[in-house]
Image: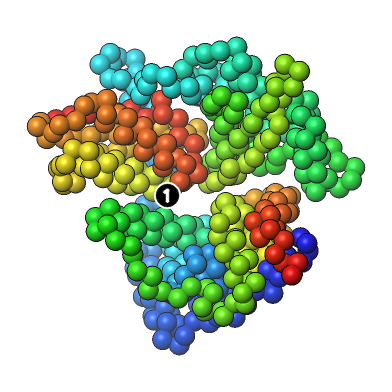
């Protein structure tokens, strides 16, 4: 069946061609771009140098501002939503407290699971799997290294440098941040479903939601623009204000593969909306953008400011 | 001067490959502007091109990123239109089914692919439909070759399940 399907895919037609008009038009644009590149060339070396200097400086500046705010501000709330069960943060444990013993156990097992990928040893994972999950794991390893399979998992590059864990009932969501020597950063997300067998919690199903999605400054710009758009529309809808009156300013950088930044919302003084509602909207949008862009965003890394004008 | 020749040569060699990839990836027929954007972006990023990798996979990689952005933009526009005018955006462009005159079975397979998660779609279109090798697919997606093999296998399985054995007919 699988071979048949592969053959059918291979046989899909792919002989469509650019028509002459489009071809000429594109060629003209290419030529134009190449000519303009020639004239810009003289500036290239200098601008590249500036880029290299400003990127680390802006990342350090953002980190410094966030640290300063965390250390000094008593008035700014950092997304402290009641009942949020994000246990996440890094393995060293930022986030809400774990509420039950079962959650504590699932959290601990999820850490073992994530660490196994970090050290590329699948054995600790295998030991906490149900028979069904073990079978799936074995099949994957056979595909990877043949009938004499071993427990090596993951890739040598990019390698995992951090992970976050969120628990929801018997499900754990693990976000991985990986890095290459370039350095370039990549994000991945995995979901684990736990079951209880004879009172022992085991991983019964695991699935990769996305894997090694590149997280770079282009992606960051896209995220900021999605957030700005989504938050503006949402606030405008809830307040009846027109979108022009909702001013959003956001800024962010990449620190150790994570997005770190701030979102500032300014509304007219007479706007009828609670501050908590705005925070909730922003938090929801961050989650939406994180899901649609396949990027792990730790909410504690984003500061919010709400102002009136 | 060398870069100029390189890009022009690549355009002649790979523009139709990029075109076909974009049609399947975006599910739209009017992707000529995207093809143009791919080559403009390639000119701007030419210094990041690693001569050890193939220009074709590099261009596919740019095309994929642009297509993802384009799909997001379309989704946003559609949401906006629906919110503002409360009406559906009319479908004005030809679909890949129309362009290639796909058979009923192939239409079903293609629609099945579009319902799968992104990494499955990626690997099925690149490796399956476009017939890139495992190595080439790995280069486009920045994955390891093993990952391409495993994901392709899972994707084919998922597609098979989605089609529910209708291929056996």
Q: Is residue A267 above or below residue B37?
A: above
Q: Nearer the viewer, residue A201 or B35?
A: A201
Task: Tell which residue pokes out farthest to the right in this image.
Answer: A148
Where is the C terminus of chain B found, in terms of image quarters? Answer: bottom right
For the point 90% across and 42% down, the residue is A148
Left or right: residue A299 versus residue B149 is: left
Tell me the crowding category of disc 1: few under 14, some 14 to 19, or many 20 or more residues within 10 angstroms, Cα based. few
- Give the chain of mark 1: A
Mark 1, residue position: A218
Quarter of the image for residue A297 reads top left
Q: Nearer the viewer, residue B147 or B113?
A: B113
Q: Is residue A211 above or below residue B35?
A: above
Quarter of the image for residue A72 reads top left
Can residue A56 be seen here? The reply is no
Can residue A134 be seen here? The reply is yes
Residue B54 in picture, x, y percent from top left:
63, 65
For the point 27% across and 29% down, the residue is A277
For the point 72% across and 66% down, the residue is B167
């Amino acid at each position: 069946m699988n071979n048949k399907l592969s053959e059918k895919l291979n046989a899909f037609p792919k002989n469509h061609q650019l028509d002459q008009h489009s071809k000429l038009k594109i060629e003209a644009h290419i030529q134009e771009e190449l000519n303009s590149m020639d004239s810009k060339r003289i500036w290239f070396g200098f601008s590249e140098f500036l880029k290299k200097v400003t990127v680390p400086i802006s990342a350090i500046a953002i980190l410094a501002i966030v640290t300063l705010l965390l250390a000094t501000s008593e008035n700014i709330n950092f997304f402290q939503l009641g009942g949020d069960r994000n246990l996440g943060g890094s393995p060293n444990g930022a986030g809400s407290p774990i509420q039950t013993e079962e959650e504590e156990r699932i959290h601990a097992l999820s850490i073992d699971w994530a660490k196994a990928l970090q050290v590329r040893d699948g054995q600790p994972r295998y030991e906490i799997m149900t028979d069904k999950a073990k079978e799936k794991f074995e099949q994957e390893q056979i595909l990877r290294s043949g009938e004499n399979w071993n427990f090596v998992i993951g890739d040598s590059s990019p390698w995992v440098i951090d992970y976050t864990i969120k628990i929801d009932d018997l499900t754990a969501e693990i976000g991985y941040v990986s890095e290459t020597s370039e350095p370039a950063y990549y994000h991945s997300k995995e979901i684990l479903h736990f079951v209880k067998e004879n009172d022992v919690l085991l991983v019964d199903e695991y699935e990769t939601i996305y894997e090694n999605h590149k997280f770079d400054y282009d992606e960051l710009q896209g995220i900021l623009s999605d957030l700005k758009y989504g938050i503006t529309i949402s606030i405008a809808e809830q307040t009846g204000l027109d979108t022009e009156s909702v001013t959003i300013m956001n800024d962010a950088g990449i620190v150790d593969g994570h997005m770190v930044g701030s979102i500032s919302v300014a509304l007219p003084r007479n706007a009828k909306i609670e501050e908590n509602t705005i925070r909730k909207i922003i938090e929801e949008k961050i989650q939406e953008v994180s899901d649609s862009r396949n990027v792990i965003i730790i909410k504690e890394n984003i500061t919010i400011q709400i102002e009136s004008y | 001067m060398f870069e100029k020749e390189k890009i022009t040569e690549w355009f002649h060699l790979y523009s139709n490959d990029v075109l076909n990839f974009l049609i399947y990836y975006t599910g739209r027929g009017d992707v000529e502007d995207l093809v143009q954007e791919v080559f403009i972006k390639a000119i701007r990023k030419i210094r990041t091109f690693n001569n050890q990798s193939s220009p074709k996979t590099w261009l596919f990689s740019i095309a994929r990123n642009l297509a993802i952005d384009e799909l997001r933009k379309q989704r946003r526009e559609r949401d906006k239109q629906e919110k503002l005018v409360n009406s559906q955006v009319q479908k004005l462009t030809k679909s890949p089914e129309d362009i290639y005159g796909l058979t009923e079975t192939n239409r079903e397979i293609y629609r099945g692919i579009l319902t799968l998660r992104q990494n499955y779609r990626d690997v099925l279109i690149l490796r399956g439909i476009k017939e890139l090798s495992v190595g080439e697919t790995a280069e486009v997606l920045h994955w390891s070759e093993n990952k391409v093999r495993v994901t392709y296998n899972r994707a084919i399985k998922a597609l098979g399940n989605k089609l529910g054995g209708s291929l056996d007919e």
